[in-house]
Image (cartoon, helix red, strand yellow):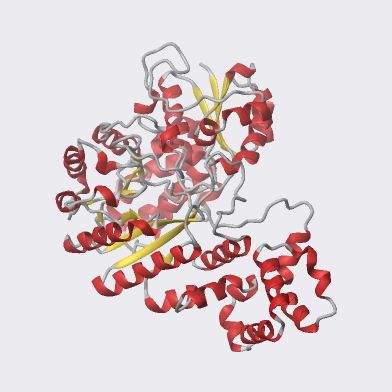
Amino acid sequence: MRTVLLVEPAYKAKYPPLGLMKISAYHKLLGDNVVFVRGKDKELRKRIWDRIYITSLFTFHFKITAETINFYKTSARSMKDVFVGGIAASLVPEAFFEETGIYPYQGLLDKPGVFDKNDIIIDQLVPDYSILNEIEYVYPCGNAYVLYSTRGCINHCDFCAVPVLEPTYKDYLPFKEQINQINRLYGEKQTLLLLDNNLLASDCFDKIVDELKEAGFGVGNTFLPSNILRTYIPIYQDRAKRNALPSAVRKIIINELLKIKVKLRPETKDYDFYYDTLDKFGAEKNLSNLTDNVLFEVMNELADLYERKRNKNKLVKYVDFNQGIDARLLDDKKMARLSELNIHPMRIAFDSIAFKDIYTSAIKLAKKYKIKAISNYILYNFKDKPEDLYERLRINVELNRELGLRIFSFPMRYAPVYRLDRAYIGEHWTPKQLKAIYKILNVTKGIVAANDEFFRHAFGKNLDEFFNILLLPEQYILRREDHEKDGSIYQLWENFERIDLSKRAALFRMIQNMDFERWPEFKNDPVAMSILNCYENELRQSERKDEKQLELSLYTDNR
């Protein structure tokens, strides 16, 4: 039996580490002992491991990922037993090798014999969801099926890493049996996240839709959530006997047992049985004081009562094509087939204003087939201009009003896939404009709702107002209503009008480029200084010698 450590660096992650989950399943299939950790753990580093696997996500997480690799790499029996992989490792392997001395594994685990001499294809294994309860971190999409029905993409967009990560388009990967096995091992889940990069390009599109319906994701399909105490939790039975439960598992058990407490009516047999059981095991006042082994005994004793009293409301099952639908390949027939599924939401990319007509047609097709909840990805800071972003958002507002839909936009700031930071500034953008977009999206949690009032307030009634908003000091953007009420915003514009054109142009350039080295040149001009004093936060940021780059964007982990 080998000891295996799986490591995810402590960056913010939306999805659980699917690669590590499959590697865990692989090693447990071979009878190995597996431990999963996020970030740096000094106690785990002290141990010697037969294998260490470290994943990576985006290239702009390079620093934290490389630091994590260097933290653990001496804890393996030898350097050849440390395996680094994932998205960033596949894109910039030379950078990781230079920083850590370990050359990463590139690409997918879709061939037999990748790590050992056997016929197992790791990428085809059912992910081991149990490792997610080894840690305290909660993934926003952790309690969902995360699968692929295709791999790769027929497009080779300049801004996308898929052609490097998945160079060969595979138009069908079986997934129904994986769903069945996940149900059996970990309980049925409400949402299926399909991470396909271009589902509509598949010659097996109809087959995939049929398989999704067979798996329970057709319109009108519902399900009864599994009894978590009978399905998922018993995976930890042996660890409970050794009083070695992950704290997250303890919390789940205790919370589920407490849920039935509130449903019990005094002076009933169930009420008496519940409290007699707690008293029997010395847990009447506090389940948290029990050892893991005893807590499992309590759980097993109350299992039948829990099954009778737990929530039995059926839930609607949803499928989410999380990487988006390619509007260029969408037609009436395909939309008709998609409408047979319980899609929530329908995600459609709107990466360029050049796709305006194609995108608009796709939205109208969705309306025709009664798909109302729509989300779209809007790429900016690539080859677009700020006015292109505004126009695409405005189009969604108009479509929302015209068609009676619920369209939510997710602006996504472009950064070159091989770059190791997020400081890239597109040729038509300025640092201040990107920072302003970041601040606006910070307030809205990255989502732009397509209703008139919200849009006008967040982005302006017209292009002139939009550009004025992008020029505002960051605290004015974050608390714009307060600054409108006290008149400070209007005073700022008046002050800009009061200074001569050449000085105003110099101020604009300095603010747009967030380059405040020329600040002292205006110290004898009270009007200019009253303007610049409003940008005090930006000035402080530019003076931080240890801050080499500004956080210029809100990056959502959808691509």
Q: Nearer the viewer, residue 214 or 388?
A: 388
**Percent x, y of residue 523:** 84, 76
Q: Position of residue 372 (x, y in %)?
A: 25, 64
Relative to 135, say whether 19 is above or below: above
Query: In the image shown, does 281 or 367 lie closer to the viewer?
Result: 367
Q: Residue at x 72, y 83 (%)?
A: 499
Q: Position of residue 439 (x, y in %)?
A: 57, 66
Name the residue located 30 percent from the left edge and 44 percent from the top edge: 188
- The relative height of residue 398 versus residue 324 in the rendered view (above or below) is below
Give the answer, above or below, for where 346 lies relative to 537: above
Q: Quadrant of residue 469?
A: bottom right
Q: Is residue 270 left or right of residue 543?
A: left
Residue 243 can be seen, yes or no: no
Q: Is residue 106 found left or right of 353 in the rendered image?
A: right
Pick out the residue farthest to the front.
502
Question: Residue 329, how many percent across, how many down?
Answer: 25, 47
The answer to which quarter of the image holds residue 400 is bottom left
User: What residue is at 53 percent from the left and 47 percent from the top?
Assistant: 137
Instruction: Name the residue rendered at 51%, 31% in the picture.
Output: 90
Q: Mark yes or no: residue 16 visible.
A: yes
For this orientation, the residue located farthest to the bottom is: 486
- Does residue 355 lie above or below 393 as drawn? above
Using the image as rendered, state which of residue 546 and residue 183 is in the foreground: 546
Answer with the quarter of the image where residue 426 lies.
bottom right
